[in-house]
Image (cartoon, rainbow, N blue to C red):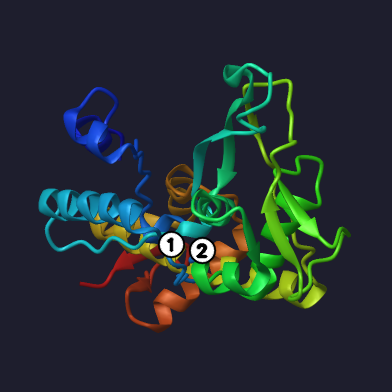
Amino acid sequence: SSGINAEWPLRPGDKEREVEGIDLGVTVLTTGYWPSYPTDSVIIPAQISAVLDKYKTYYLNKHSGRKLTWQHSLSFCTIKATFGDHSSAEKKIDLRKELNVSVYQGLVLFLFNNSAKLTYNSIAESTAIEEEELCRVLQSLACGKTRVLKKLPSGKEINKTDNFEFNTEFRHKLFKFKINQIQTKETAEENINTTEKVFQDRQYQIDAAVVRIMKARKTMQHSLLVSELYNQLKFPVKPVDIKKRIESLIERDYVERSKDDKNVYHYVA
C-alpha cells in the first residue's frame, strides 16, 4: 500500500487536506496473509467518514474487483488537544498537546469537542463501541496514568452511572505522547480458540503454497517440496504439519504419490 499512499492526494500541503483538516494514512492488508478480525460497527464522525469514503473510492478505482473493509480496532490516530483554563495566566502554547491514541480512544475524545461533560450512556450511544471495549477505553482515558478525562465519581471501575468531563487541569511534560490502552486478559478458552483459528488460517496458506509449487514444478521429491515451502511461508511450521497438509491434498486429488517412489509427488491437473 506504500505506492498507493504516495499517490493518495490527501497529504500535508494539499489543498484538499487543508479543507478537511485530516491527514489520512492507510495500510492495506491482504486477507490471506493476516489473521481474520471481526468487523466493527462503531460510529465514525461525519468529517472523518467522508475522508475514509474518498480513500475507498480512490483505492477501488485503482484496483477494480477488490473489497476494502476498515478495521477500526487496529487503527490509531493523533489528536491535537488544548488543556487548561484559557483565562489562566499560563502560556497557551504550553497547553497544546498531541495525543497518540487508538481510534476507539479518539472517538470518545472527539465527543468532548462539543460537550464538556458526558454520561456513560451518551458516550456509548454516540460511539456504538461494544460495552466491554468501551469500559477499557474509558479506563485508559480516565483511570490510568494519563488522565485526560475526569470520572465522576472517581474510582478504578467503570459503571453505567458514571459521568465524564474533559480534564482541563491535565498537564504533561511532553508535547506529544501516547495514551496506552488497557489490555484485556485472555481466558484459557479464548487462548485455545485463538490458537485454533490461527492454525486453520495457516492450513489454507500451506495448502495454497503446496498447490502453487506443484503446479509450477509438476513433479517433486518430498524433501525438496518441504524446503521450498519453508522458503515461501512467512510463519514457522513443523514438518509433521506439512506432511498432514500434503496427505489432505492427496485425499482431495490435488497431488498424487508416484507409483515408483512414495517420496515423490505429482501434480494432478
Q: Residues within 10 Å of mark 1 (few under 14, many from 20)?
A: some
Above or below for 126 versus 165? below
Q: Residue at x 25, y 34 (%)?
A: 17
Contact flag, marks 2 and 1 (Cβ < 8 Å) = yes
Question: Which of the pair 245/138 is nearer the observer?
Answer: 138
Disc 2: which residue: 202
**Residue 211, image quadrant:** bottom left
Q: At numbered mark 2, what does the secondary structure look like: helix, strand or loop?
A: helix
- Find the residue positioned furthest to the bottom: 251
In the orientation shown, which residue stands out farthest toward the front?
Answer: 87
Q: Position of residue 102 (x, y in %)?
A: 57, 48
Residue 100, numbered label: none
The x and y percentages for residue 60 are 16, 55
Give coordinates of residue 9: x percent, y percent.
19, 34
Task: Decide: is 160 above or below 223.
Answer: below
**Which residue is nearer to you in this view: 97 or 262?**
97
Q: Secondary structure at mark 1?
A: helix
Res. 3 visible in picture = no
Q: Which residue is mark 1?
A: 205
